């Protein structure tokens, strides 16, 4: 039997939890000086690291060494090019490569055009704001879930329009204790529930959707901290655009004060969200609303809720990719899915290589599954307005998956036959491609941290290159992977 809501009186009278316990309020450390000058430049200050500086310098030296090698091996590159031109297989490969390069280059320029046109929707007045249910599913998050709930409670959102639900998904640590502490602190402002056993994030959210009374559902990961104006900015598009079915928040990394991988990922996240999702939003077709922060129109959720909770892949229940699946099903209904750049959330990311590749495998498998699902409706008349954007984004995703295995095989062939040419050309490519990410981050936030774009690209190219093909081959497998 699932537990009932626990009201605040039960805590104050139980004697097990002190009502006047000293509980620290989470602080969203914002560079207020820059925020006043330019409201879009909301950023968390990160302390410098000698180790990090050494890694960045080593990365740049490695990349410039690659450029030097390309010039040194220019005759070998010319010879390889001639050999390809003189063979049928080489010509076919060259034609495919050029075609994909032209397509990807055109997509980049089009995305850049869309990004430059994008503007987030400004917050509407308190009177126009809809009623909102915020659902926080938690599993083995410890005190972080308390910090998450406190940041949500401190939002400048009308209290009478805000419902907070915290759902412990059968945690094995002290997560339930910290959820109870949040209840002590917030009283009737938060309702808390405990699953009888760990059933997975999708089932915890499902319970929240069925309990929630708001016109809009907001889902927030239990290791995430929101800014004061995040909620009102996130739900305002539903008021302005009646066809809006879902909204994606702007995710940045919380835990990159010391760890190297989160520092790299923060730059990657800014590129993924603020550039790519801005472009997708202009097409009304953001492909994934992130679990860290997303909003859904309740009517759109209930229209697909039975299908979502019972979703299977190759005969097995789907226990991953609940955010991408929900987004896909709402797109399928013909709704717009938008991105709000002014809705910031800071979330924890893995700090170890093992944790990171497991997270990427989960994302990769979900991407394969949901692209298959999207293929079933994207070429049909699923939306009254233009379907061009959704179809274009699907085509790009589909081609990426389709060409993964052939290029993976070619890469190993290239390494076996011309190892130095592969290394030098890969490093030159990283320098060229990552320079845009570095420039983008430097312009919006910090020049010093922007150099992590290069380190991340080197790390991904040489340490995580296997994720995409492995995810395709194992897309049928279940498991969250990163849950303890």
Image (cartoon, rainbow, N blue to C red):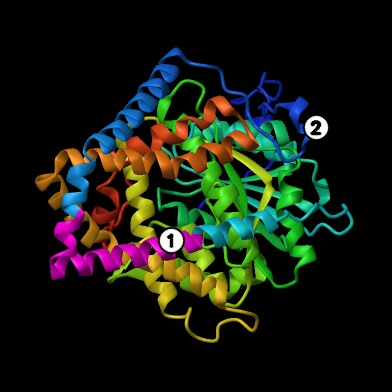
Which residue matches tag 2?
37
Q: Say left or right for 266 vs 467.
A: right
Asked if residue 307 shows in the view, the reply is yes
Label total for image = 2
Coordinates of residue 415 in the picture (x, y in percent): 15, 45
Closer to us: mark 2 or mark 1?
A: 1
C-alpha span from label 2 to label 1: 36 Å
> Residue pushed farthest top?
50
Question: Is 405 or 353 nearer to us in this picture?
Answer: 405
Question: Is 248 or 96 nearer to us in this picture?
Answer: 96
Residues in magenta, as a range: 81-107
Image point (67%, 18%), residue name? 22
Q: Say left or right for 258 vs 484.
A: right
> Residue pushed farthest bottom?
381
Q: Which mark is residue 104?
A: 1
Magenta-drawn stretch contains 84 = yes
Magenta-drawn stretch contains 294 = no
Question: Is 13 or 410 nearer to us in this picture?
Answer: 410
Image point (40%, 53%), residue name? 199
> Is disc 1 placed on a helix, strand or loop?
helix
Coordinates of residue 65 in the picture (x, y in percent): 30, 28
- Quarter containing the C terminus: top left
| Up-down relation of residue 442 to residue 215 (above or below) | above
Coordinates of residue 161 in the picture (x, y in percent): 80, 53
| Up-down relation of residue 7 to residue 51 (above or below) | below
Q: Which mark is residue 401?
A: none
Image point (33%, 64%), residue name? 98
Coordinates of residue 361 in the picture (x, y in percent): 32, 50
Asked if residue 4 shows in the view, the reply is no
């Amino acid at each position: 039997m699932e537990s009932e809501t626990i009201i605040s009186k039960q805590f104050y009278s139980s004697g097990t939890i002190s009502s006047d316990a000293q509980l620290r309020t989470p602080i969203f450390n914002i560079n207020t000086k820059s925020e006043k000058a330019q409201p879009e430049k909301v950023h968390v200050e990160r302390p410098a690291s000698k180790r990090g500086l050494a890694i960045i310098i080593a990365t740049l030296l490695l990349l410039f060494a690659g450029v030097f090698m390309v010039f040194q091996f220019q005759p070998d590159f010319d010879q390889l090019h001639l050999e390809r031109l003189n063979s049928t297989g080489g010509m076919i490969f060259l034609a495919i490569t050029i075609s994909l390069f032209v397509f990807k280059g055109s997509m980049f320029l089009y995305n850049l055009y869309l990004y430059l046109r994008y503007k987030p929707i400004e917050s509407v007045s308190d009177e126009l704001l809809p009623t909102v249910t915020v659902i926080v599913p938690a599993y083995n998050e410890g005190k972080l879930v308390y910090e998450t709930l406190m940041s949500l409670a401190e939002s400048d959102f009308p209290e009478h329009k805000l419902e907070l639900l915290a759902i412990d998904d059968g945690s094995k640590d002290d997560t339930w204790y910290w959820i109870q502490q949040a209840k002590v602190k917030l009283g009737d402002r938060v309702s808390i529930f405990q699953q009888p056993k760990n059933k997975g994030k999708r089932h915890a959210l499902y319970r929240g959707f069925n309990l929630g009374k708001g016109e809009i559902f907001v889902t927030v990961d239990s290791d995430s901290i929101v800014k004061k104006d995040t909620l009102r900015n996130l739900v305002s598009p539903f008021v302005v655009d009646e066809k809006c079915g879902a909204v994606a928040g702007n995710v940045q990394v919380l835990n990159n004060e010391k760890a190297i991988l989160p520092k790299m990922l923060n730059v990657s996240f800014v590129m993924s969200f603020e550039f790519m999702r801005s472009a997708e939003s202009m097409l009304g077709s953001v492909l994934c609303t992130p679990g860290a922060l997303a909003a859904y129109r309740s009517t759109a959720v209930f229209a697909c809720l039975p299908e979502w909770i019972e979703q299977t892949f190759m005969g097995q229940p789907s226990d991953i990719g609940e955010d991408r699946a929900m987004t896909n099903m709402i797109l399928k209904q013909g709704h717009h899915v938008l991105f709000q750049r002014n809705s910031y959330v800071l979330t924890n990311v893995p700090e170890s290589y093992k944790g990171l590749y497991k997270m990427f495998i989960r994302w990769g498998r979900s991407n394969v599954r949901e692209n298959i699902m999207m293929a079933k409706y994207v070429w049909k008349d699923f939306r009254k307005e233009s379907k061009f954007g959704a179809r274009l984004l699907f085509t790009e995703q589909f081609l990426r998956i389709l060409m993964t295995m052939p290029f993976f095989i070619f890469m190993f062939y290239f390494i076996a036959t011309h190892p130095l040419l592969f290394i030098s050309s890969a490093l030159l490519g990283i320098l060229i491609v990552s320079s845009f990410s570095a420039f983008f981050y430097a312009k919006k936030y910090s020049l010093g941290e922007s150099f992590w774009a290069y380190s991340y690209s080197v790390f991904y190219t040489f340490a995580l290159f296997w994720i995409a093909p492995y995810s395709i081959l194992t897309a049928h497998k279940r498991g969250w992977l990163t849950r303890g």
